[in-house]
Image: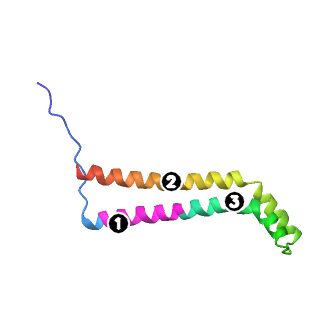
Amino acid sequence: MTAPAMSRPTPHHGAITTIAIALIAGSAVLGLLVAGITFGALAIAFPLAVPIAEQAHVQVSTADALLAERFASLWLVFGAFAIASLAGALGVVVATVRHFERRQR
C-alpha cells in the first residue's frame, strides 16, 4: 500500500494581503518602467545633445560638451539598463500573476 500523496496547502490570503501585494507589485512595476524610460531617453539624448546644440547655435561650455560626449560613449550601458529595467518590470508582472493564479487553484 502506498502513502497518500501529500499536497502542499495553498496559501490563503485575506483581502488586505491581496491588496498589499497588488499595490507593492504595481509600485515596483511603475518604478521599473520609469527607470527603463529614463535610461532609454539618456541612451538617445546624450549622443544627440551636442549636435543639436550646435545646429541651434546655442552656447555650450567646453566642459559641458566634453561631459556630454563622454556620456554619449556610454549609450550602450544606458540601453542595457533600460532593457534590464523593462525586463524586471515584466518579471514582476509575471511573478505576481503566477502568485495569484496559484492561489486560485
Q: Residue at x 45, y 66 (%)?
A: 27
* Label 2 SS: helix
The three-letter code of the residue at mark 1 reads Ala
Instruction: Name the residue that disc number 2 marks.
Output: 88
* Label 3 SS: helix
Q: Residue at x 28, y 68 (%)?
A: 16
Image position, residue 102 (x, y; %): 28, 49
Q: Quadrant of residue 64?
A: bottom right
Instruction: Name the residue that disc number 3 marks.
Output: 44
Residue farthest right in this picture: 62
Q: Which residues are magenta?
A: 18-33
Cα distance between the residues tagged 1 and 2: 20 Å
Image position, residue 66 (x, y; %): 85, 63
The three-letter code of the residue at mark 3 reads Ile
Residue farthest top in this picture: 1
Image position, residue 38 (x, y; %): 61, 64
Label 3 crowd (10 A; few <14 / some 14-19 / many >=20) = some
Residue farthest left in this picture: 1
- Dot 3 or dot 2, earlier in sequence: 3
Tell me: 40 left or right of 68: left
Q: Residue at x 81, y 60 (%)?
A: 69
Cα distance between the residues tagged 3 and 1: 36 Å
Residue farthest front in this picture: 55
Label 2 crowd (10 A; few <14 / some 14-19 / many >=20) = some
* Residue 29 is a magenta residue: yes
Tell me: 80 left or right of 93: right
Tell us which disc is closer to us: 3 or 1.
3
